[in-house]
Amino acid sequence: MDIIYTKLYTRLSPYLVGILLAYYLYKRKQNNSPKLNLIILSVGWIAASSVSLACVFGLYNHELTLVGACFYNSLNRICYAFGLAWVIFVCVTGQGGAVNSILSWEVWIPLSRLTYCAYLVHPLVLEYAFFSMRRLLEFSHITMILHFLGLIFMSYVLALITSLLFESPVIRLERQLRDKFKS
């Protein structure tokens, strides 16, 4: 855990995919590129969906060999990032359709403002939850669902508190300074 999983470079490939997507979108906007045709959109959706679903559910009820586990662990993050990059690409270019409508729904705005704070505080919630257990957790689907929902809820409650105590005052101060310097 400490040697490999928590190191920043283990997640470098998804960041690079995001940077490459941003650069491609920037160049595409500069060149006034036309919209994609239906065949490319269909192939892109099928490939992105297949790869993303394989990354999430590909190991379900499968025993991997050592080579298979090495391939999966080395490629699953970058492949999932490419699947998400496709969704972002089609939504930004205005060809996302129903997916763009769902992701642009105004109900998501409050949660989206708390997402980064939740990302920052969730390791603390996880450590507190798991280090405070007095015995091993017995696996069952309902137990995992309850733990997942409880930990997500606690992460977002702490994210709300963190946002109200730190992020919101800093954003307000930044706006006041920006307005002062503009005038």
Image (spheres, rainbow, N blue to C red):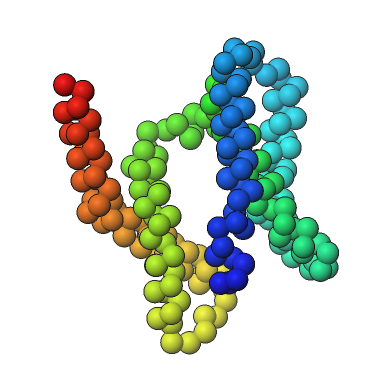
Which one is in front, 132 or 138?
Answer: 132
Which one is in front, 18 or 83?
Answer: 18
Quadrant of the image containing the N terminus: bottom right
Identify which residue is drawn at 60% across, 21% down.
27
Identify which residue is drawn at 57% across, 76% down.
139
Task: Look at the image and tell me whether residue 146 can be seen.
Answer: no
Q: Is residue 101 left or right of residue 90?
A: left
Residue 172, horizontal then vertical, whole percent: 21, 39
Quadrant of the image containing the C terminus: top left
Question: On screen, 108 above or below 32?
Answer: below
Which one is in front, 89 or 176?
Answer: 176
Question: On screen, 152 above or below 38?
Answer: below
Residue 158, horizontal then vertical, whole percent: 31, 60
Task: Look at the image and tell me whether residue 103 can be seen.
Answer: yes
Residue that extends furthest to the bottom in the rendered view of this protein: 135
Q: Is residue 7 left or right of residue 127?
A: right
Q: Is residue 55 left or right of residue 112?
A: right
**Where is residue 140, by image quadrant?**
bottom right
Residue 131, horizontal then vertical, whole percent: 43, 79
Number of marks in the image?
A: 0
Identify which residue is drawn at 81% across, 68% down.
66
Q: Is residue 15 left or right of residue 114?
A: right
Residue that extends furthest to the front in the rendered view of this protein: 181
Question: On screen, 94 above or below 67?
Answer: above
Identify which residue is drawn at 40% across, 48% down.
115
Residue 141, horizontal then vertical, whole percent: 56, 69
**Where is residue 36, by image quadrant?**
top right
